[in-house]
Image (tube, rainbow, N blue to C red):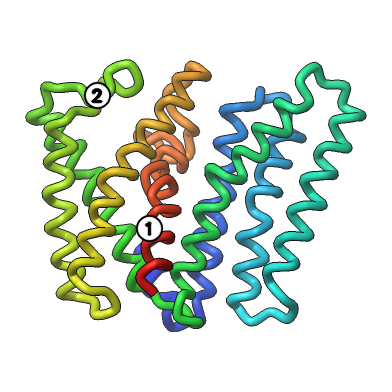
Amino acid sequence: MLGGIIGAQYFHGIPFVVLFGIISALSLWEYAGIVFPDSDVFHKLATAVIGLLPYVFLGLYHLNCPGSCLPAILYASMIATFMLFTSELYAQSEVPFRNVGMVLLGAIYVGLPFVLLNLIAYESGTYDYRTVLGLTLLTWTNDTAAYILGKRFGKTPLMPKISPKKTWEGSVGGAFFTFLSAWGLSELFSNLLLFDWLVLGVLVVVFGSYGDLVESMLKRSYNIKDSGKLLPGHGGVLDRFDAFIYMLPFAATYLLWIR
């Protein structure tokens, strides 16, 4: 994955767009698998398609495909959404608006953060891997350190009703190593100041942790342990990227503000 992010610098960003397009599609499919029963293939596909449309159009735009990006995203998303409403007229479901709502929630909760990641990567007009790589490393550092230190020293549950294994001790340890990594990134990359990397570190620690908890809350609501089985021993793709996804809107907002 890291190779795809860095290597995309030499291929006009194409590997990056493809890589995170696949991750987005798999995450959307797993989300749909949680909120819709196994037999409901239509709504699973609708979730993946509607959630992925903005990313695809924006990716094509950044790869210099012809046409204006934003109108295409708006029109395609609106048409797909209204076609979904129309399909519910014929499906004769007992909960049509619940179905539509869960599809659109997937597009917002899972799909849109990857659109923002695309904007971050192409913020300067051309692909730049540094901020994307930094956010990825900060998130992985926080997750890994919080898990290891929480398992070794954790005694005080963070939110026992939602995720009893997550502890305050692990969270503090994760924060320490995340801030240390933020300092290292400021020494390695010149595109952001030390202060900016530290702010991004704070956003990763706070909202990345919330992302873990929100996905745990989603899984508990449907009485499942993992979002999928694609990564043996690690659950699903959404399990691996829940913190990263949840943090992205806040990081993108900050990066837009400082520009």
For residue 165, the mark is 2
The quadrant in which residue 195 appears is bottom left
Residue 188 in the image, given as x and y percentages of width and height: 19, 75
Which residue lies most toward the front here?
Answer: 257
The residue sitting at 40% across, 53% down in the picture is 250
Task: Look at the numbered disc 1 and give the secondary structure of its residue.
Answer: helix
Q: What amino acid is at disc 1? A: Ala
The residue sitting at 20% across, 60% down in the picture is 198
The residue sitting at 15% across, 55% down in the picture is 179
Residue 150 in the image, given as x and y percentages of width and height: 15, 32
Callout 1–callout 2 Cβ contact below 8 Å = no
The quadrant in which residue 17 appears is bottom right
Label 1 packing within 10 angstroms: few (<14), some (14-19), many (20+): many
The answer to which of 254 and 103 lies nearer the viewer is 254
Q: Nearer the viewer, mark 1 or mark 2?
A: 1
- In the image, residue 174 sits, relative to residue 133, either above or below, namely above
242 left or right of 75 in image: left
**Can you identify the residue that label 1 sits on?**
251
